[in-house]
Image (cartoon, grey):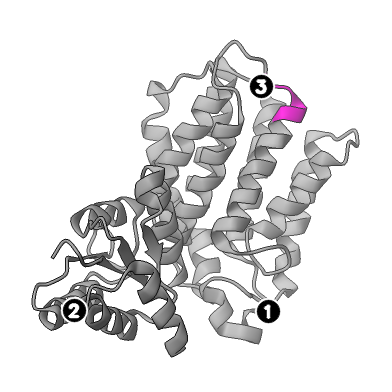
Amino acid sequence: MIRGEALKYVLQYVARAVVEIEQELNALDRAIGDGDHGCNMSRGFRSVLDQADQVNYGSLSVVMTFVGRTLMSRIGGASGALYGSLFVHMGNALPEEAETEVNFDSFVLAFESGVDALKELGGSDINQKTMLDVMIPVLNLLKSGQNLSLTTVAEFAELQSRSTIEMRAEKGRASFLGDRSIGHLDPGARSSQLIISSICKALTLI
Amino acid sequence: MNDNIGIVVVSHSAHVAQSVAAMSHEMSGGRIKISHCGGNDEGGLGSHVGDIIRAIGDAWSDQGVAIFVDLGSTEMNSKLAIDSFEKDKAGKIAVMNAPLVEGVITATSIATDGESLKEIQQMLKNMGL
């Protein structure tokens, strides 16, 4: 699996994509939250970019742990806790030694460990208008054993993200709005989708 | 003093956290250790795991530490903060399921009698706060 310069390219590509949609995420969050999801995500991923030259790209585990710790400390709030845990748990589930090959199956297992950590920390599950409405279906798609193209995964993530528009928020601050949360795209689902789609896109470019 | 649990007040607002901790401190007459944290680096609202870890350290008691939180992300960050401690210490720290102001005031009055963390947790639960 991916390492070295290619891994650095993907990481920077994804981080820049998150920074670029700062305003859009803020606008989505203003509708059903406190309006700072874009600022927070952008702060976290800018910090990832700032430190990108000091990371050991020989090991996917090390990179995941670096991203998780950076996001946890720089984003703050619920997003920092959730995205931080996702990446830290993925890093923990992957072999740390650079020479150990990470194959698709072990990557999916690591992703599952990250998603489980999200569920546990947020006390949340699917259909509650959260980032899990992207993460869980994408995980299930990856586990399905189908022959998948990167474009298929990216498009599927986008479809799942849009499915949160019709959902009623059951978790987080948006849940205070009850039925008034219906009709808005969930900011966390959007940022999750963007990260997944950007990874897929970056992988087609290397 | 070392026989009593410590209390950590975590709010999105530094002012709320500070004020609730001040009330608790006055009520306890300095008989329990109380620390607080809240807000972000820019003086706005927020919650950061690093701040909570520091606050737990400040209020540390071998009898345990009770954390009181306001909104969901303070709870999540508190859980992460607990996970960052060694197992034997982490087992003595718990996030209380009670409203911030009422919970802290109630726990303060119980804790000054030397009740354990588990007893305080149970009493808060029974009160249905």
| Badge 3 amino acid | Ile
Upstream in sequence: badge 3 or badge 1: 1
Q: In this view, does A94 lie to the left or right of B128?
A: right
* Camera-nearest residue between A174 and A5: A174
- Residue A103 within the segment the image draws in magenta: yes
Residue at 48% over, 63% down? A26
- Mark 3 or 1, which is nearer the eye? 1
* Camera-nearest residue between B35 and A14: B35
> Regarding mark 1 in the picture, which secondary structure is present there?
loop
> Regarding mark 2 in the picture, which secondary structure is present there?
helix
Q: Which residue lies furthest to the top in this view?
A: A99
Judging by the rendered image, the residue that carries numbered circle 1 is A182
Q: How crowded is mark 1: few (under 14 residues within 10 Å), some or many (20 or more)?
A: some
Q: How far apart are marks 2 and 3 (CA)?
A: 58 Å
- Residue A189 within the segment the image draws in magenta: no
| Badge 1 amino acid | Ile
Judging by the rendered image, the residue that carries numbered circle 2 is B24
Q: Find residue A59 and report its horizontal and vertical position in percent.
A: 55, 20
Determine the chain carrying the residue at label 3. A
Question: In the picture, which quadrant includes the C terminus of chain B?
Answer: bottom left
Q: In this view, does A98 lie to the left or right of A105?
A: left
Judging by the rendered image, the residue that carries numbered circle 3 is A206
Residue at 54% over, 21% down? A96
Q: Which residues are the magenta region?
A: A102-106
Q: How far apart are marks 3 and 1 (CA)?
A: 39 Å
Residue at 19% over, 77% down? B112
Q: Residue A25 carries which label?
A: none
